[in-house]
Image (cartoon, rainbow, N blue to C red):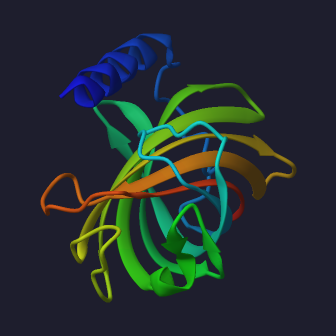
Amino acid sequence: MKKIVSTLSFLAFAAVVANPANANPFFNGYDNQVGFNFGWGVNHGFIVPPPTQWVPFNMFQFQYAQPTTFFRLPARMSLGVVQTLGHGKKYGWHWDKYTIPIAMLSEDIALAYGKYWYTYTGLSVGMQLQQNERIGSKLIFGFKLGAGVHVSECTAIEAYVQHYSNGNTAPENHSYAFYGLGITYSF
């Protein structure tokens, strides 16, 4: 409950800081976007995990997105395919067991932005192909914090932290967490 209250407090503060939604900073005036994300795993259960226990666990994501709004804030709705890839054992976990494809639907919301940069948060829901003892459910939920910078009119580079868990819908909920980089192309 404490995590939910602090997340909602952060979103309320961010909504006050955000600029008016007259332009969508994710898209720079375009209507479609493809993106590729790469993340490196962290063994921690916090919604924003500290980067203290790096693990041999990666995430690759391809997504297609379109512009939308969330309570008048600029946003993007994405459909993504995620592939996790584990290799080796660390901190008592066999990470190769968690090499699982995931289908995700997400909404990223711009919090504060300028002409060439933006910060955002995102929520997602998805299904992993198989459940395991780390997540305990096929149904997973995600939370994301990130920042992006436009390197051209159509292209942006993003840095983010991503958290996936089952939202306490199953007895086991150790989560997947990643720090990552992404590139988007709008057209």
Q: Is residue 187 visible?
A: no
| Residue 26 falls left or right of residue 48 | right
* Viewer-side residue, 128 vs 70: 128
| Residue 15 falls left or right of residue 113 | left
| Residue occupying image coordinates x 76% and y 58% | 154
| Residue occupying image coordinates x 51% and y 66% | 92
* Viewer-side residue, 46 vs 144: 46
Work out whether 73 lies above or below 143.
above
Image location of residue 60, percent across then percent down: 62, 75
Image location of residue 73, percent across then percent down: 40, 31
| Residue occupying image coordinates x 47% and y 80% | 98
| Residue occupying image coordinates x 14% and y 63% | 170
Image location of residue 5, percent across then percent down: 24, 21
Image location of residue 132, percent across then percent down: 31, 79
**Count of numbered badges drawn on the protein:** 0
| Residue 116 falls left or right of residue 106 | right
- The N terminus - image quarter: top left
| Residue 51 falls left or right of residue 79 | right
Work out whether 20 lies above or below 156.
above
Which residue, as the protein is rendered here, is positioned at the far front? 92
- The C terminus - image quarter: bottom right
Q: Is residue 87 visible?
A: yes
Work out whether 68 lies above or below 112.
below
